[in-house]
């Protein structure tokens, strides 16, 4: 899919479909700090069997903040207990992704 406009309010379910396992959604997306990036060209990392496949189609904020692939879940990342250092780590990763990958849009805010 060629994105000709940025998508806002991407739902968590839409994000989950972009995990590299759904043939009808070939792009792989990853979310950090509410920003969704198209990491398809990093398929060797994020595709099935890749070392960072746990981030594919996920809100990886907590996992990246804690440098723990096991902390990537299928739900909104819990960030309320992150330390300042962890928050900065996640910001650093966001900048890395912004420099390397296409920004797709923003994850819809979590309904309370
Ligand atoms: C023994 C532990 C680890 C080693 C040896 C390692 C090694 C590497 C290497 C060599 C790269 C660069 C790959 C390239 O650009 O060709 C990389 C990228 C990366 N690593 Fe790790 N890593 C480790 C642990 C982790 C952990 C725990 C996380 C996060 C939970 C992590 C997240 C990432 C991410 C997000 C990238 C960027 C991939 C991209 O460019 O899209 N790494 N790692």
Image (tube, rainbow, N blue to C red):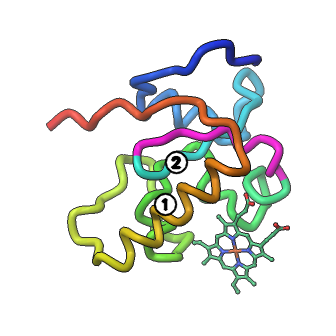
Residue 90 percent coordinates (x, y): 46, 65
Residue 48 percent coordinates (x, y): 77, 52
Callout 1: 10 Å neighbours few (<14), some, many (20+)? many
Locate residue 30 relative to residue 88 in the image: left or right. right
Quarter occupied by the N terminus: top right
Residue annotated with mark 1: 72
Q: Ligand 1 within 8 A of label 1's CB? A: yes
Residue annotated with mark 2: 58
Labels 2 & 1 near each other (Cβ < 8 A): yes
Residue at mark 2 to residue at mark 1: CA–CA distance? 7 Å
Residue 34 percent coordinates (x, y): 41, 43
**Residue appearing at x 52%, y 34% in the figure:** 15
Locate residue 13 relative to residue 103 in the image: left or right. left
Specify the quadrant of the image occupied by residue 96: bottom right
**Residue appearing at x 61%, y 40% in the figure:** 37
**Residue appearing at x 72%, y 39% in the figure:** 21
In the rendered image, the vertical position of residue 64 relative to residue 31, given as above or below: below
Magenta-colored span: 34-43
């Amino acid at each position: 899919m060629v994105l000709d406009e940025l998508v806002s309010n991407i739902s968590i379910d839409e994000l989950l479909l972009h995990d590299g396992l759904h043939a009808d959604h070939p792009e792989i997306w990853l979310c950090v700090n509410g920003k969704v990036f198209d990491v398809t060209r990093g398929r060797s990392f994020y595709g099935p069997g890749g070392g960072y496949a746990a981030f594919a189609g996920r809100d990886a904020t907590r996992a990246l903040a804690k440098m723990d692939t096991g902390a990537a879940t299928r739900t909104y990342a819990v960030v309320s207990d992150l330390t300042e250092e962890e928050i900065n780590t996640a910001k650093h990763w966001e900048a890395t992704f912004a420099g390397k990958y296409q920004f797709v849009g923003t994850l819809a805010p979590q309904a309370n």
